[in-house]
Amino acid sequence: MLTNADITIYNHIYDKATRLDEWRRTVIHGVHFYVDNKVSVGDSGLNSADVYKIRIPEDAECDSQYAPEDEYASADSTAGIWTLQDGDYVVIGKCDLEIERPADLSKAHRQHCKITSWSDNRFGGLPHWRIGGE
């Protein structure tokens, strides 16, 4: 698989003590990243949106291990693991920013998307995870 970028994934995990989502950051090196600008005609004129398509090879360089969404949510500690789940955020490039809420990414003017779909395609000739976002 051709790779052209690094990404930073921000996983959310609910903290029962504070009753807020906490955001954990994981940098993954060597992914394929593509943005498509979609335009449609609506009642109020032209509507446009960026559609993100990201593929993470199974052997991408990362300091953490992938864990399925249910294992991530029930883990005693999320240190050293990452997951894919709807509602998480992906920043294009390496991002050292610790966030309290997703709006912090916009304030920092970082290109990012919200994960709206994903699939585990770790079978066949090119094992990878696919992320769709807006």
Image (cartoon, rainbow, N blue to C red):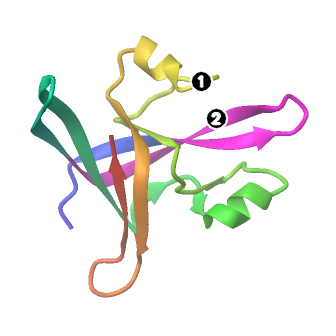
Q: Secondary structure at mark 2?
A: strand
Residue 56: quadrant of the picture:
bottom left
Question: Residue 133 appears at what percent x and percent y?
Answer: 35, 46
Dot 1, crowdedness within 10 Å: few (<14), some or many (≥20)?
A: some
Question: Residue 8 appears at what percent x and percent y?
Answer: 45, 40
Residue at 69% in and 65% down: 70
| Residue 103 higher or lower than 112, as above or below | above
Q: Which residue is mark 2?
A: 23
Amino acid, disc 2: Trp
Magenta: main secondary structure equals strand
Residue 9, numbered label: none
Dot 2, crowdedness within 10 Å: few (<14), some or many (≥20)?
A: some
Left or right: residue 45 versus residue 5 is: left
Left or right: residue 87 versus residue 74 is: left
| Residue 70 higher or lower than 90, as above or below | below
**Residue numbers of the magenta segment:** 9-34
Question: Residue 10 appears at what percent x and percent y?
Answer: 54, 39
Find the residue positioned furthest to the front: 43
Instruction: Please report contact status of discs 1 and 2: CB closer than 8 Å, yes or no.
Output: yes
Left or right: residue 129 versus residue 30 is: right
Residue at 50% in and 19% down: 103
Residue at 22% in and 56% down: 3
Residue 36: quadrant of the picture:
top left
Amino acid, disc 1: Ile
Nearest the viewer among 90 and 118 is: 118
| 3D distance between C-alphas at marks 1 and 2 | 6 Å
Q: Looking at the image, how many numbered discs can be counted on the residues?
A: 2
Which numbered disc, 1 or 2, marks the residue that appears first in the sequence? 2
Q: Is residue 10 magenta?
A: yes
Q: Which residue is mark 1?
A: 99
Residue at 64% in and 35% down: 23
